[in-house]
């Protein structure tokens, strides 16, 4: 008797228009056909948010009919603990292996977040670690990753860069962190990237301009892949000289600094 | 008299099978239709290598007919100086603005590298900086980025990560650098990523296993998006326990370490 075939864990990227209205861009703007073809045949999903996953799968169905009706799919949400604390640090002790039981029975599973690539600036790493622990194959599919679209379009160093997540919200701690990141970028040439919740972008931009040195280069990329997409990249001195930010800052944004 | 419309600089990602034989995967495995549709209508290109760009555009033509014959396209190679030293550091003084003359006359321009996203772990940043200096819109298109496919599939921390390029080739300097990166990963939780030329991967893996602590987690992702694609992620102790690396190391690879 041979061992049952193990399922594969597919990492399925989704469009970056989550929460945007209308959410009407064709998937072929941002996903290769292969990505939605794989998604269409998966019967098991692990997700940050079941509602957004159902909405995504309806869009997939319009391009490539789902192998099973939406109601028949098994869609499992990551527990609240993962949303609150993140699941990127194994020391936090979240064991995702039980979520992968279907793969041990031979079913392929899809992992998704609300927008972009799961496990990058989003939950999901615990599920991928669990897949490796169980000996499952892990296959990432191609799709949009706002951090990298922003980095390429910034003109900053893409041969050495770091994404540091969110900055502190306390003004003094944030200023301190900005100075640390600026020093790192200036001394090592390593581009520093961070993100913020859209409604805080305007305040973050003003704080950033208030703290950084005039010659530091600052890029802000907003609404990547959306119709409103804009990337502005200039020295801090030039940002200040030209007055109000020439960007729709209420959209998801990536901030980058470098030499 | 109104000013002439300025051209846009499109960052055009290409498949990751450069140098692979046969190079026969359909573009729809790795690129959204939008990416090749934009590529098909561009008459001006800036590239790392004109030959690989012509090969890419032949593949585009099979999906979406080129607006002009291949021989009529203006394909400009980045100068040798950019290949040798990189173009990510403005201090090196390479001014790419003359390459963008066609955009000042209203033509859209595509920027490409040999594989993946231009200006990420590849030349191109000087051209993007020049575009911002000239006031051109910069629009990055979606495609495969091996660093991020590897990161998502590694199960390592994707909320805080750094790509550091290549390690030193001298054995002592490389060991020293590996220890620095391990300390950084352990103390800050920041995943560290680096790459190597394929024929050196086996030696690099052995050196890495020889230097790192048993509990450090090491992931190696090879051949991302290719049929041979494999990701292995385990503690250094487990890598050593299981003997020979279970990966085809002659392919392009990404190395990652973390907690």
Image (cartoon, coloured by chain):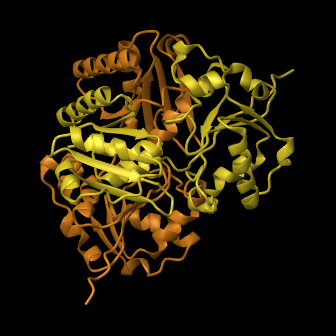
Chain colours: A yellow, B orange
Residue B128 x/y as whole percent? 29, 58
Whether residue A87 is visible to the viewer of this picture, yes or no, is: no
Residue drawn at point x = 23 percent, y = 31 percent: A179
Task: Between residue B59 and residue A216, name the one nearer to us.
Answer: A216
Residue B249 x/y as whole percent? 47, 32
Residue A192 x/y as whole percent? 31, 37
In the displayed structure, A8 sits above or below B133; it is above
In the displayed structure, B65 sits above or below B158; it is below
Q: Which of the 4 image quarters holds residue B103?
A: bottom left
In the displayed structure, B116 sits above or below A98; it is below
Drawn side of residue A100 relative to residue A216, left or right: right
Residue A37 x/y as whole percent? 71, 52
Number of dots carrying numbers: 0
Drawn side of residue A95 relative to residue A149, left or right: right
Q: Which of the 4 image quarters holds residue B216?
A: top left
Q: Quadrant of the C terminus of chain A?
A: top left
Residue drawn at point x = 49 percent, y = 77 percent: B66
Residue drawn at point x = 58 percent, y = 45 percent: A115
In the displayed structure, A45 sits above or below B65; it is above
Whether residue A156 is visible to the viewer of this picture, yes or no, is: yes
Drawn side of residue A88 relative to residue A24, left or right: left
Drawn side of residue A116 relative to residue B93, left or right: right
Instruction: Name the residue at the bottom extreme.
Output: B1
Q: Quadrant of the N terminus of chain A?
A: top right
């Amino acid at each position: 008797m041979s061992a049952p075939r193990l399922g594969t864990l597919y990492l399925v990227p989704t469009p970056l228009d989550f929460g945007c209205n209308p959410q009407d861009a064709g998937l072929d703007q941002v996903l290769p056909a292969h990505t939605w073809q794989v998604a269409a045949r998966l019967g098991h999903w692990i997700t940050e948010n079941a509602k957004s996953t159902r909405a995504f799968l309806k869009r997939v169905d319009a391009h490539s009919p789902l192998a099973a009706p939406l109601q028949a799919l098994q869609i499992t949400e990551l527990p609240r603990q993962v949303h609150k604390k993140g699941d990127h640090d194994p020391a936090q002790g979240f064991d995702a292996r039980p979520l992968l039981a279907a793969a041990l029975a031979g079913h392929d599973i899809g992992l998704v977040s609300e927008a972009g690539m799961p496990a990058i600036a989003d939950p999901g790493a615990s599920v991928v670690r669990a897949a490796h622990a169980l000996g499952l194959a892990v296959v990432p599919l191609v799709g949009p990753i706002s951090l990298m679209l922003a980095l390429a379009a910034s003109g900053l160093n893409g041969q050495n860069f770091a994404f540091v997540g969110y900055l502190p919200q306390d003004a003094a701690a944030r200023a301190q962190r900005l100075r640390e990141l600026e020093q790192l970028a200036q001394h090592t040439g390593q581009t520093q990237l961070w993100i913020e919740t859209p409604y805080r972008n305007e305040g973050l931009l003003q704080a950033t301009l208030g703290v950084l040195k005039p010659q530091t280069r600052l890029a802000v990329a907003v609404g990547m892949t959306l119709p409103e997409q804009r990337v502005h990249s200039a020295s801090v001195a030039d940002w200040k000289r030209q007055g109000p930010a020439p960007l729709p800052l209420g959209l998801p944004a990536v901030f980058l600094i470098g030499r």
